Image: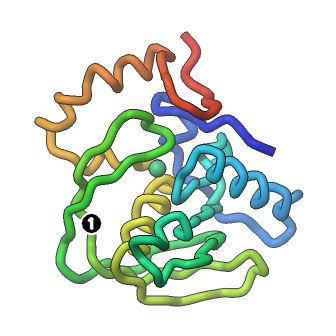
Amino acid sequence: MILPIYVYGQPVLRKVAEDITPDYPNLKELIANMHETMDNAEGVGLAAPQIGLPIRVVVVNLDVLSDEFPEFKGYRKVFINPHILETSGDLEDMEEGCLSLPGIHENVKRAGKIHVKYLDEDMQPHDEIVEGYLARVMQHEFDHLDGKMFIDHISTLRKQMIRGKLSAMLKGKVRCAYRVKAVKI
Ligand code: NI
């Protein structure tokens, strides 16, 4: 089932999300719905707060990038209770967008390497060092679980440049190709 995506201004996007337990109700269905919602909106990642749930669940689909990055052919994953333990490596600058910030694309500096712990969809623990594009996607998505969005990492000047778009969103004015849940005023 395709769920509406919560847009900038929705308070759930600013909450610190909670870890879940293996008995979280209808988890398999939730994960399937998150994949469907992400695919419908043509995103590479979606965090549970973006569908209104303050829990630590993220889905990622990098297969859409496999023309450019062949190593991501068939790459589709779920990260449950992810936590970044350490960041390292040089900061890398790259343009990002977000399904909760339609129409906004800005360069964001992120660590090149991260040490991450998470559970997969079978609740099996993983402890990994991740680099490159996946490290960027994880940092963006896991930020959502800490109530952060990519615009928190841009300069004051850049933030001023997008102020009009942000205030339109706060007034509930959002135009995009997928279903959203904007702020109601
Ligand atoms: Ni995002």
164 vs 117, left or right, is: left
> Relative to 137, does residue 172 appear above or below in the rendering?
above
Residue highlighted by disc 1: 110
Q: Provide residue 78's location: percent of width, then percent of height.
A: 65, 70
Q: Provide residue 48's location: percent of width, then percent of height.
A: 64, 52
Pick the front one: 56 or 28: 28
At x 26% / y 82%, what residue is drawn?
A: 88
Q: Which residue ends up furthest to the front in the rendered image?
A: 67
Task: State the image quarter where residue 92 is shown.
Answer: bottom left
Pick the front one: 105 or 152: 105
Task: State the image quarter where residue 102 is shown.
Answer: top left
Pick the front one: 160 or 39: 39
At x 49% / y 39%, what residue is drawn?
A: 100
- Look at the image and tell me in which quarter the N terminus lies: top right
Q: Which residue ends up furthest to the top in the rendered image?
A: 185
At x 59% / y 76%, what residue is drawn?
A: 75
> Relative to 151, does residue 46 appear above or below in the rendering?
below
Tell me which colouring the rendered structure shows. rainbow
Q: Provide residue 125's location: percent of width, then percent of height.
A: 66, 87
Give SS at disc 1.
Answer: strand
At x 27% / y 54%, what residue is drawn?
A: 95
> Label 1: few (<14), some or many (≥20) within 10 Å?
many
Q: Provide residue 136's location: percent of width, then percent of height.
A: 37, 68
> Relative to 140, does residue 132 appear above or below in the rendering?
below
Q: Three-letter amino acid code at disc 1?
A: Arg
Q: How many marks?
A: 1
- Look at the image and tell me in which quarter the C terminus lies: top right
